[in-house]
Image (tube, helix red, strand yellow):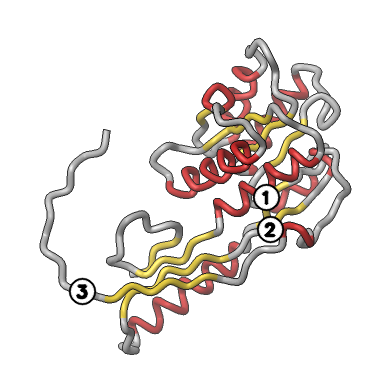
Amino acid sequence: MVLLGPGGETHDFDTVALANFDGAYAVVRHLQRLGHKRIATLTGPASNRDAQQRLEGYRAAMREAGVSQTRTLELRGDFTEPSGYQAVQALLKLPHRPSALFVANDVMAVGALGALREAGLRVPRDVAVAGFDDIAIARHLTPPLTTVHVDAYQLGERALQRLLRRDAGEPAPGRSHEVLPTWLVVRASCGGTPSEGRRVGDAPAKRVVKRTLAVKRRPVIAKAKK
């Protein structure tokens, strides 16, 4: 079996995942370079590892900029368009509105842009917006969405290659955990100079492959997380 996405603490399966932390960190640092200090984020489900890693990247970039307390700027979504719309409605009720919003996926960003437009706010003049995933519609939104590009085709291809090798009985020393790069795509929604390719300052690191030795482990009783 091959898992698509971060495998958490498990080493029982091969995994192929995305550099979620790096992508989130890069987009928030980009917003900071544009002069934004009060940057909110709309995250995904708490149980989703991709969402957790993107939130960790956001927090790391904010700490680096001297902002250690971000909980009041973190809103929870569920990766759907309605949750993006509803989160922005809550965001606009804050006593001090943020000047920028990092949304943990582009689908929620679509809803967020709709809510901002209905509120009469201009993007990026009043609120800058950036997403994650670079879905097909992102470049066609009004304004076109700054986002983090994800190569979904490569993600599936790498997982299938590993699965076929396992099924063919190809010997393997242990489980592999591969992380594919992401990169920042700058468009008009954040007010920066548009750039459809990799920005030199945010070029992704080479693909990372970690291997763990296959070892026999005693069965354990899983405890439910609160």
Q: Residues within 10 Å of mark 2 (few under 14, many from 20)?
A: many
Task: Please say if the residues under marks 1 and 2 sit with CB atoms less than 8 Å apart.
Answer: yes
Q: Residue at x 82, y 32 (%)?
A: 124
Q: Position of residue 220 (x, y in %)?
A: 12, 55
Location of residue 125 with respect to 46 vertically, above or below: above
Residue 198 coordinates in the image, percent (x, y): 76, 62
The residue pinned by badge 3 equals 215
- Which of 15/71 is in front? 71
Q: Earlier in the sequence, mark 1 or mark 2?
A: 1
Q: Give the residue at x 71% y 40%.
A: 130
Q: Which residue is mark 2?
A: 183
Q: Position of residue 217 (x, y in %)?
A: 15, 67
Quadrant of the frame with the C terminus:
top left
Kind of residue sitting beneath label 1? Ala
Which amino acid, mark 2? Answer: Trp
Report the residue marked by disc 1.
26
Q: Nearer the viewer, residue 66 or 62?
A: 66
Whether residue 194 is situated above or below residue 69 in the rendered picture: below
Q: Secondary structure at mark 2?
A: strand
In the picture, the quarter occupied by the N terminus is bottom left
Spatial CA span between label 3 and label 1: 37 Å
Cα–Cα span, label 3 and label 2: 35 Å
Question: How far apart in space, not on screen, are marks 1 and 2 (Cα)?
Answer: 8 Å
Q: Is residue 9 left or right of residue 122?
A: left
